[in-house]
Image (cartoon, rainbow, N blue to C red):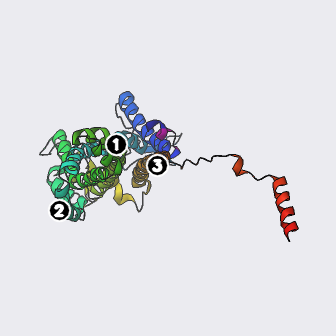
Amino acid sequence: MLNNALRNPMFMFGMIIIVLLLGSSIFYSIVYHDDIPQTFMLYDDDGNLIDRSPLSPVQVFPFGTDKYGYHLFEQIIIGAKYTIGIAFLVASMRMALSFVAGVIGGTYFRRTLRSTAGVVDAIQYIPISLLCYFILHGVLMENGMEGTFSFSFTERMVFEVIILTAVAIPTTTTLISNETNAIWGREFIEGARTLGGSRRHILLKHVLPHLGPRMMIIFLQQTVNVLILLLHLGLLKLFFGGTFFNPDPMLGDEYRSVSGEWSGLIGSTFRFLSYETWIPLIPILFFVLVILAVNFVLEGFKQVVDKQSYSRRMKNVELPDIKTEIDSSSFSFVHNHGEMLERKTASR
């Protein structure tokens, strides 16, 4: 299936975008050690001051600078590995935990799932962003200058990953359970049971192989959900790894991201959207680009799965075997018709 997916244009287009962003971010970290150039003031050839930060993309190619003079292009490159990596990590953990529980529930507790489906459906209407905000606020937000956090960066990061994973476990588990339950109700499963296959044998040989493509689709959907959740938390000033908050009654409260991932760049610069538009707009565009890339991969993979399912159904359709036996009675010779007409005429 992977070979067929690599031939799909939408799948390949999305994968190229993701690989380029991740590869360039890792390369920059290895070669330049995540160093961000700074241009606080811009001078002409004669040494005269032209402008000071923030500098527009026309003045500093390609994306300009923030208000401290740090180049946005390098910030975007550095933040790519954190943003995409966090999304893939949380989505993988959601799938790993939900897959085991979902397969077991869809195989051995099918009646129990029907009775608890209403509870899980009600959970889906809880605003996950606000729930995460209330849980994470006391850990990620800290007043004052750098270094005054109550928890270390590793502790904050691990805690946030756990929370972002846990909030989606009930719905993801139910989704996988329903997919597993649907496969158990298919006709070929009944045929395997008729032939004497045990439940374990059917699960390993028939259910899991058919469940694999669906798991890939659910994983990509969860990746998009994590990206959107990070964006919501960023707009609420909760950045991955922690938020530095410095109250300033004169210039306005300042929020800065610890890790430099894109949702932190968006949340910390969103107030500049009305005048220095490029500062928040650049990370917003790249965030949208990654979400589109993952959706391209998702849609391309869906097309491959649907095409293979259609081909498999067409192979299983048996055309009726029409056998026609041809002998001398199947033919009527012309001279016989002439003799019959002459006889009828003579009789009249």
Q: Is residue 23 in view from this perspective?
A: yes
Specify the segment rendered in magenta. 4-8
Q: Give the mark, 3 or 2, whose residue is nearer the N terminus.
A: 2
Query: Badges 3 and 2: C-beta atoms under 8 Å apart?
Result: no
Give the SS element for disc 3: helix
Which label lies toward us, 3 or 2? 3
Cα separation, mark 3 vs mark 2, equals 33 Å
Give the Cα separation between the discs numbered 1 and 3.
Answer: 18 Å
Mark 1: few/some/many CA within 10 Å (<14, 14-19, 20+): few
State the residue position of label 2.
115
Residue 205 is left or right of residue 148, and the answer is right
Q: Quadrant of the C terminus?
A: bottom right
Residue 212's mark? 1
Circle 3 residue: 313
Residue 145 visible in the displayed image:
no
Residue 244 rendering spot, x and y as whole percentages: 22, 49
Residue 266 appears at what percent x and percent y?
Answer: 35, 53
Amino acid, disc 1:
Gly
Q: Which of marks 1 and 2 is nearer the N terminus?
A: 2
Provide residue 132's location: percent of width, then percent of height. 20, 56
Is 2 or 80 nearer to us in this picture? 2
Query: Which comes sooner in the sequence, label 1 or label 3?
Result: 1
